[in-house]
Image (cartoon, rainbow, N blue to C red):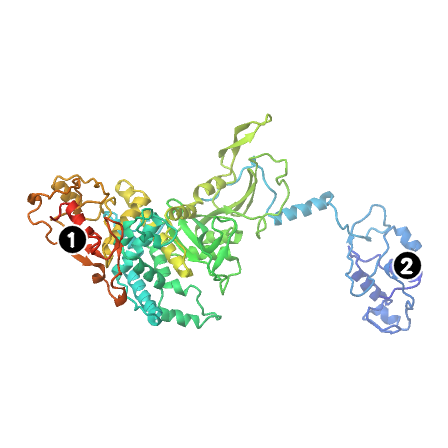
Amino acid sequence: MFLSESEDELQHLQSDSLGSESSTCSLEEEEEEKEEEGNYIPTGLPRGSHQDFTDEESSEKKGEKTPLLRRATRKRCCSLSISPVSSSLKSPPKKCEQRPHRKKLHYATTPQKNSCPHPGRTVSTPRRKKGKKKGPAGTQLEAEEDEDDGGRWHNIDEDDIVPPQPRFRPEREVGPQLNRTANYTPLELFQLFFSTTVVNTLVRNTNAYGEKKYQSQRESWVHVTTADMYSFISLVLYMGLVPLKTLKEFWRGSKLFSLPFPASVMPCRRFLAISRSLHMNDPAAEATNDQKKGTAGYDRLCKIKPLYQHILEACHTFFHPHQHISIDERMVASKAKIGLKQYIKNKPTKWGFKLFVLADSTCGYTLNFFVYGGRDSEPTGKGIGYDAVMRLLNIPFLGKGYKLYVDNFYTSPTLFRDLLERKIWACGTVRSTVAGYPKSKRNDMTKNTARGAIRWVRNGKLLFVKWLDAREVSMCSTLHKAYSNDMVQRKVKNKDGQWTVKQVTIPGCIKDYNRHMGGVDLSDALIRYYNVLHKTQKWYKTLFYHFVDIATVNAFILHKEMCKLHNMPIITQKNFREQLILSLAEIGSTPRRSAPQNFMLPTSPFKGPSSVASASAANVPPTLSRSCCHVPLTAVSKETPGSFSKVPPPPLSNEEPSSTASDVPGSGHLPAYFVEQMSNVAPRKRATAGRRSCVVCKRKSPVYCRTCQKTLCFTTSRNCYSEWHRSNRICI
């Protein structure tokens, strides 16, 4: 920038600018004034250039040339020497820019008393860099900032308005969407989620993958039937009741692992074969989807899609939620090497698949959920939490007037305002860093604030509340008042260091949040009690087991709700699962080889009069007794083939039993080989295939009794077959 050298020019500039009506004086305005005088050369023109500007005064002085500064030091560029005129004005010296690329300095005008002889003249002063605003102007600026930040924080003594409360208007009757006059068995409730269509789809896809997998192996694939799949699901649920480390331990015959039920439902090899080939989607559709990997059309959840979609549809079809609902994450434990796996440090299960779940806060029923597969290809730009809430609430027949509770991962002013437009009220914890949170520090909490203190700000329909408990808690709500005279008990130390119970204030939004936020946690607890999940090498099988858990827990909740409607006693979840396991085993397939009978299992509630009734008709007590050699003793029931009535054993004796023990002693008790009921057995393995422990000597034997269904040795060195029947007075 070029400056005038003479003080006369400076005095001339000041005298001409006294009549100006401008209230501020910046460098740009000084440049305009110099342009009017014709003594200013704009920056960028070459030295010595003479150019006229659009001004009448400048045109009159066309011949006059303004001398230029040839020696411009940094000191002279920054400030001018104080002239007598400038000193009489008592104004700070005018500054100019040192270099063109530097930031321009703008000065705020503040009039000084008795400092300027001309009343229309204002002198510029530098703006303060930092410091508090003083005077009425500073107070006005603070008020404007508070209005932008949502206003100051109010105390508990200041009254808050009561927001309009929602009117609950569901589109369906709340509760189970079933025939409320009928009685449903556990099996019928479970089949609402695992219907015949779902089971047939599992069977078809499992057979397709099994045939493809066993093409290169020596053994051929044995087709799975619908009954086989029911038996498989029955054993999966049973493994949740009786957990063991490995699957093969359920079929071990030792004293420590003597579990007769799994072997009576399905052989171990058959169960493992179905488990290895289990598929929820068609292998051809999976191969087509694999070709799209790396493109937008690739579906990461293709392997679970058919069952996944049916379970989702069944969840919100057969139950309508109450007014209070909640949304939270759920972790399904897994360490599979796949991109779907997530890590959440605050969850008990830190590694696994993350599910976003919408649950009923009253009973814990899972209404809707989806597996998080990464960021959406078309996000809304409002955050993952916003998109998850809107997706979960996008279910039919929901209605209006619901109260939603979420945590700080989802809460945002934008979400709560959009939910209000859909007639859904919301409440949840909020992060102080979220957009729209009040930033005002006036009347905020300090380090010396007492426990139970409340601060609140209302921003339109949104209420922001701070409550100091053991730590500071921030809430956001669209349905609560700031304070409703609620109290809570807390243990605090008095001056003597002793613990005492103290009543402290608590906002109503926090009290309702603690009461209704646990819907997803309740559902997780019901699943975790008898979780069927076990280790597997395929990630999609982990989600299959979780879908079985969801179906079982939802069926149990439907059972409880139906019992409440009929004023009937509610059974526990353990008893519900036991009845479901037995029912699935009854409609399932029978094993291809016999299994030892379990006399300690209760009679199935879905069966008619069985061996217990026949035993009572014969005046035989249904208690179990054993002989001195610890062999279970049974008598053949003539009413029901294959069922056994328990009779007390006589002592072993070398004497021959009387001929009146039976009209036809030993009729039908013929030995048979297990391999006769098996297929696809290699000839070299037929001698040992299907061997089980003998009930007398505990050694392996391939022979059993057709009528008694007992494994017995029948060799040249051991004749346990004859010994056992004689000791039980079945044959002579």
**Foreground: 583 or 594?**
594
Q: Residue at x 89, y 58 (%)?
A: 80
**Which residue in the rendered view is the most extreme toward the front?**
717
Q: Hey, which quadrant is residue 728 in on the image?
A: top left
Amino acid bearing label 1: Thr
Q: Is residue 218 visible?
A: yes
Q: Position of residue 259 (x, y in %)?
A: 30, 49
Q: Position of residue 450 (x, y in %)?
A: 59, 34
Q: In front of the other: label 2 or label 1?
A: 1
- Packing grade of label 2 (10 A; few <14, some 14-19, many >=20) is some
Q: Are marks 2 and 1 in contact (CB under 8 Å)?
A: no
- The disc placed on residue 715 is none
**Foreground: 331 or 715?**
715
Q: Position of residue 15 (x, y in %)?
A: 88, 58
Q: Position of residue 338 (x, y in %)?
A: 47, 62
**Which residue in the rendered view is the most extreme toward the top?**
496
Rounded to the nearest angstrom, the CA distance separating label 2 from label 1 is 130 Å
- The disc placed on residue 707 is 1
- Give SS at disc 1: loop
Q: Quadrant of the N terminus?
A: bottom right
Q: In the figure, is residue 561 to the left or right of 417?
A: left
**Foreground: 625 or 574?**
625
| Precedes in sequence: disc 2 or disc 1 | 2
Q: In the figure, is residue 655 to the left or right of 17?
A: left
Amino acid bearing label 2: Gln
Q: Is residue 167 visible?
A: no
- Give SS at disc 2: helix
Tag 2 residue: 11
- Packing grade of label 1 (10 A; few <14, some 14-19, many >=20) is some
315 over 162 or under it: above or below: below
